Amino acid sequence: MIGLYTAEEIRAAEEPLLAETPPGTLMQRAATGLATVCVRLLHGVYGRRVALLVGTGNNGGDALYAGARLAARGARVTAVLLDAERAHPAGLAALRRAGGRVRRAEGPDVRDLVARADLVLDGILGIGGSGGLRPVAAELSTAAAEGAGLTVAVDVPSGIDAGTGAVDGAAFPAMHTVTFGAVKLGLVVGEGRAHAGQVHLVDIGLEPHLPAATAHQLTDADAAARLAPPSATDDKYSQGVVGIVAGSTTYPGAGVLCTGAALRTRPGLVRYAGTAADGVRAAWPEVIVTDGRPGDAGRVQAWVVGPGMGTDAAARSALDEVLATDLPVVVDADALTLLAEDPGPVRGRSAPTLLTPHDREFARFGAEVGADRVAAARRLAADLGCAVLLKGEATVVADADGAAFVNGTGTPWLATAGTGDVLSGIAGAVLATGPRAVEAGAVAAHLHGRTGQLAAQRGPLVAGDLVRRLPEAVGRVRGLRPDRLGDSEA
Ligand SMILES: NC(=O)C1=CN([C@@H]2O[C@H](COP(=O)(O)OP(=O)(O)OC[C@H]3O[C@@H](n4cnc5c(N)ncnc54)[C@H](O)[C@@H]3O)[C@@H](O)[C@H]2O)[C@@H](O)CC1
Ligand SMILES: [K+]
């Protein structure tokens, strides 16, 4: 698992490391790593035009020292100082010694210089920044984005909150972020995720000083450990039997998709109970189907309740029946709408329980999600005493004790009808194998995202494509490199 940290946690870990190393050591490590990534991304350095956007803190120092290294290798480097009197003096001297040029941010030609660069390094603000970019910095960031060159953020894209990913005003839009010591939470969630682009982690020796992370991102290997194939001694009952209560005569498709996703994730045995029984039976002859109550379906190890089931009295009664069991439950869609009216039955549960709201469903429980998505998921989880999977571009899963996961897989093509029904089916299948609810949610989100990426390789996807591609996605998750940070390179 990849640990995700706030700016405060990073600063606390840096203190002892700074004390035990000669002055400037960490900045040199950071700048060396940064320059190395830039060389790789540029596919050669000689003659390339590099613009450094340099703020007043150590983040600007990192950019200046990295720029000096690139200049020494023949790049044409210009540092653009946002506050000429307060730029890192030793970094400036190093850049000048290496043949780099230095200029102020003011002037009509600066925008052009930035837009024409092959590489723009954002050293405006690091983890010491607060609030959005000031006007000149914002204008130059826009020029960088509109230009033809690579945009690379130093440590964090300037203007994002490193701990939450919130953007208050303007922020630097990076294609790549080279981050130091540990991955900051704000690089993988909320608006910060889109601004960070691909994240590259540079080791500066911080790891021994880092606390145990309270937020993580799963790798493929982590997810694969929860998606192990059946052993030789398994039978159809021993792999986690899933019960699905989803779909209705009005929305049979939700039942078909949710059931199919559970079946394709963990094809031991899936049972279905609900009024979409005919549709489910026709689509999935492998499933044991009843049009009666959940209790009529037979024994299961976990329930999924909600997608397309409606919100009438019969749906409420089915939800209450499922929640009254001592079995793990995934609560989704219509069941969330019902639950928001009276969350009592979830508060009293001791078995693993996972709620899977999107933002509007989340708000029905009393508060908007807001800019800090991890905090929002933690808050609702603590309030209800269960795990909460908050869907989004980077899905967040949090537990009542504060443990959180931020998903790193997926594609914007997943924003289409029925993909949520697929996610809850996957989550039910994983939950039936016995993990904590928060872990099941994290594995399900990871696999769902990977399946989306796989299906999107062939163009636009619909939810049924996800169900079809799930077995292949499970296989790929088992086989991929173990050290990937979502789509990013660690
Ligand atoms: N502490 C260390 O040992 C290391 C720090 N490193 C770098 O240092 C960075 C942190 O350095 P700093 O603590 O100097 O912080 P920053 O480089 O983030 O800069 C903070 C400065 O910016 C000003 N500022 C804050 N918000 C602003 C805004 N919205 N607009 C304009 N100015 C604003 C502050 O007044 C302060 O002077 C890290 O992100 C990393 O890049 C690395 O060199 C590795 C080692
Ligand atoms: K930066």
Image (cartoon, rainbow, N blue to C red):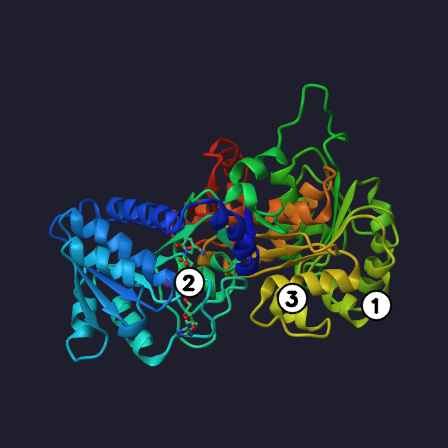
Question: In the rendered picture of this protein, how many numbered marks are placed on residues?
Answer: 3
Q: Earlier in the sequence, mark 3 or mark 1?
A: 1
State the residue at coordinates (76%, 56%): 386
Q: Is mark 2 within 8 Å of ligand 1?
A: yes
Q: Is residue 92 left or right of residue 155?
A: left
Q: Is residue 22 left or right of residue 1?
A: left
Identify the residue position indicated by label 2 in the image: 126
Q: Earlier in the sequence, mark 2 or mark 1?
A: 2
Q: Is mark 3 within 8 Å of ligand 1?
A: no
**Amino acid found under the numbered disc labelled 3:** Ala
x then y, percent, for residue 215: 61, 52
The crowding category of the residue bearing disc 2, from other C-alpha atoms within 10 Å (few below 14, some 14 to 19, many at least 20), is many
Query: Could you tell me if residue 357 is visible in this image?
Result: no
Distance from Cα at disc 3 to Cα at disc 2: 24 Å
x then y, percent, for residue 336: 73, 64
Ligand 2 quadrant assignment: bottom left
State the residue at coordinates (39%, 51%): 23
x then y, percent, for residue 78: 18, 63
- Does dot 1 land on a helix, a strand or a loop? helix
